[in-house]
Amino acid sequence: MEKVLMLATTAAMIEQFNKRNIELLNEMGYLVDVAGNFKEGNPISAKRVRDFEKWVRERGGACHDVPMVRNPMALRQNRKAYQMIVGLLQRESYAFIHVHTPIGGVLGRVAAHRAGVAVIYTAHGFHFYKGAPIRNWLLYYTVEWLCSWWTDVLITINREDYDRAKRRLHTKRVEYVPGVGIDSKAIAGLTVNREERRRVWNIPERAVVALSVGELNQNKNHALAIQAIGQIKGEEIHYVVCGQGEERRKLERLAKKLHLGDRVHLLGFCEDALEILRCSDIFVFPSKREGLSVALLEAMASGLPAVCFSIRGNVDLIEEGRGGYLAPAGDREAFASGIERLALSAKLREQMGRYNQKKAKRFDCLEITERMREIYQGAARGAQRREDACLWNDCGK
């Protein structure tokens, strides 16, 4: 059987967002190996990483621990990772590779170019975007522009990135695939005992629960949501966060300072985030930067209205005044206003939640899988043409 390599900076990224793609490639007759950092930087439990390794091996693939890190300035460690990827591509015979994440995307594409292997790159949200700091444009745009010459297929997951890539990058093919897909029917059909779950969290029955799902880091911006909820008077709003990360202590101190210690619930990494969505009233999404958020899509499929910033990706999903409220980027007052308006009206929450649930069906995994099948089939044909050209050139020498 032919083999494909799936590569990202961390193994968790592939486990969380690419298991369906691995299943699809298996269905198409490929064995799939996985490469990434299995030991560090994974925002999921160590057990879940081990379970993922076992899952890959049960499907006939191999797992390669490559010590990539997200920090682009960690030159020594990422150089070592690059050399390992080159060695892997030279040892194995891959039909093509599919790479993800900024660091994994760069190292994987440069290594694939050196090894003469066709490459698909999924950009889960460029670090250069409308309103991004100038340093992002100087660093990330320059690197992406250079690597685009060595990219056979670039997959973008939101309209802003797709339009920019078509205009400014030199990839052979640019494709638009709206995210990784969700099982909208299964999510909508989940049933949970809301009252029991809220009792576990010590949340009163009549309180409004605002939920965020995401890593506790600066980009996810949970501090702004805590501040926004802190300035809303007269409504008992509890803020529940599913996620772990380096900002936990900072967020706990902020909640205590604003006298919200008993109304901010940091649950850590949650395997049952979909069930927690069903126990909530409003999805609060204060991220500074997104590609096309799976968490936001899952909240929509769960029938929740959303409050988020009017940034790339979010504007593809949430319609102002119909599925929630889009505050101008960084505007805490407008963000707090959106939460307050929804907290005050159960009828409005229900109306907007129904609208989101209907819209989420457009992003169902069945639709996404068929788009990915077409892209993989095209990549396979392109890889075959490349191999035939190499053989022809060898014969002519």
Image: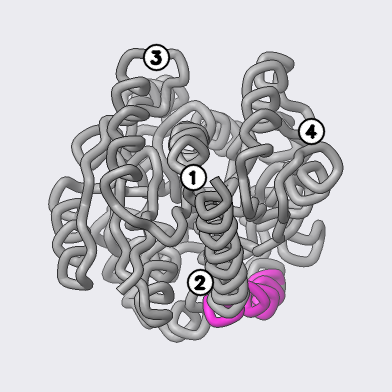
Residue bearing the label numbered 1: 116
Kindly report the distance in space between the C-alpha atoms of the residues bearing marks 4 and 2: 27 Å
Q: Nearer the viewer, mark 2 or mark 3?
A: 3
Q: Is residue 197 left or right of residue 222?
A: left
**Relative to 355, residue 392 above or below:** above
Label 4 vs 2, first from the N-terminus: 4
Q: Is residue 229 left or right of residue 328?
A: left
Kindly report the distance in space between the C-alpha atoms of the residues bearing marks 3 and 4: 28 Å
Residue bearing the label numbered 3: 75
Residue 233: tell me if it is visible: no
Residue type marked 4: Lys
| Residue 20 horizontal/vertical position (percent) | 41, 71
- Secondary structure state at the residue bearing disc 1: loop
Bounds of the magenta segment = 352-367
Residue type marked 2: Ile
Q: Nearer the viewer, mark 3 or mark 4?
A: 3
Residue bearing the label numbered 2: 182
Label 2 vs 3, first from the N-terminus: 3
Local packing at callout 4 (Cα closer than 10 Å; few below 14, some 14-19, many 20+) is few
Residue type marked 1: Gly
Question: Which quarter of the figure has residue 170?
Answer: top right
